Amino acid sequence: MKLTSRQIAESIGAHLIGSDDVRIAGVASFESATLEDLVFVEHEKNLAQALASSAGAVIAGNFARSASAERVLLISDHPKLAFARAARMLREGVREVPEIHPTAVIDGSAKIRSGVRIEARAVIQENAEVGEGSRIGAGTAIGQGVKIGRECEIYPNVTIYPGTQLGDCVIVHAGAVLGSDGFGYVRDHKTGRYEKFPQVGLLVIEDDVEIGANAAVDRGALDETRIHRGAKIDNLVHIGHNCQIGEDVVIAAQTGLSGSIVIENGAVLGGQVGIGEHARIGEGVMLGGQGGVLPNKILRGKGQAFWGTPAQPLKQYLKQLAVVSRLAKKQ
């Protein structure tokens, strides 16, 4: 799909300088851009490189308003965000033809809405629902009673256990497993053996959530696990049973969450973070990579960074590192 420079400017709220009918088909870097591509520049020091590229149009900050160039400019207060929105608009304009592959296995009681694409060898079990315009990738298994909202993108080989609910515009990347049993056992002190605690709750994933490749999100034990609107979960993340992940939370790769953890709105967890059961991460807290939070611990402080194991405020952690370093030098 191609859009004019004016259509893009109006859609992302940018001020257009130059021709309003340059046709744009995609986005690119400075090095790979063609005349039908859009690029962006966040810092004035890189403006010359952007203008020297072959791009048809450049999204830039207010520093570019007075630039003397023949290139079409789209001026925005937040060039990177504007670029992301433009890229999404261009991508969404290219729709795959809705179809159901002949090798897909779909139970007769399943409800498949209009505009859905179901690829090869996908399996959709009884009473499942797939919303308008969603895509189910090859080899994906959708369990009994699963509900998938509108405009969802389920990539190949995803497994969604029975009873899981997905909102609208959810993206699930290849190999993810949603709604599997939590890791809950009760030890018989007489025999030393473990018996499985019931895992009969739900997994609810709200609108605009993205879940990375090979991530695993457990269902609730007796109640529910819930991923709230706009959360972004990276590859190889594990979220245990009964967790509550707040709105617009970001969780980087290889993070592991035990059961019954609350991550409040806007928190950011770095890569390889580990959090013990019943802990709470407060609104807007930033937890650095490989940080560890002990069970039942509460971290609070919007915009405050924590680091280390056990996690503590960054300034305190750095002071401790400095003391340890000085002591080591005295040895």
Image (cartoon, rainbow, N blue to C red):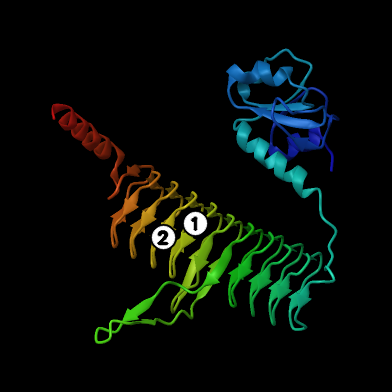
Residue 305: image location, x then y, percent: 35, 42
The amino acid beneath tag 1 is Val
**Residue 256 is drawn in which quadrant?**
bottom left
- Tag 2–tag 1 contact (CB < 8 Å): yes
User: What residue is drawn where x is 58% and y is 54%?
Assistant: 212
Please provide percent x and percent y for residue 281.
36, 55
**Image quarter hosting the C terminus:** top left
**Vertically, is 76 above or below 309?**
above
Amino acid at the residue labelled 2 = Leu
- In the image, which disc is placed on residue 257? 2
Q: Residue at 67%, 18% (x, y): give it.
A: 49
Q: Is 165 positioned to the left or the right of 195 in the image?
A: right
Residue 168 visible in the snapshot: yes
Label 1 sits on residue: 237
Residue 145 vertical placement versus 155 (above, below) = below
Element marked by disc 2:
strand
The N terminus, quarter of image: top right
Residue 65 makes an appearance in the image: no
Q: What's the residue at 58%, 17% (across, down)?
A: 45
Question: Where does residue 265 sit, x and y in percent of width and height?
Answer: 45, 54
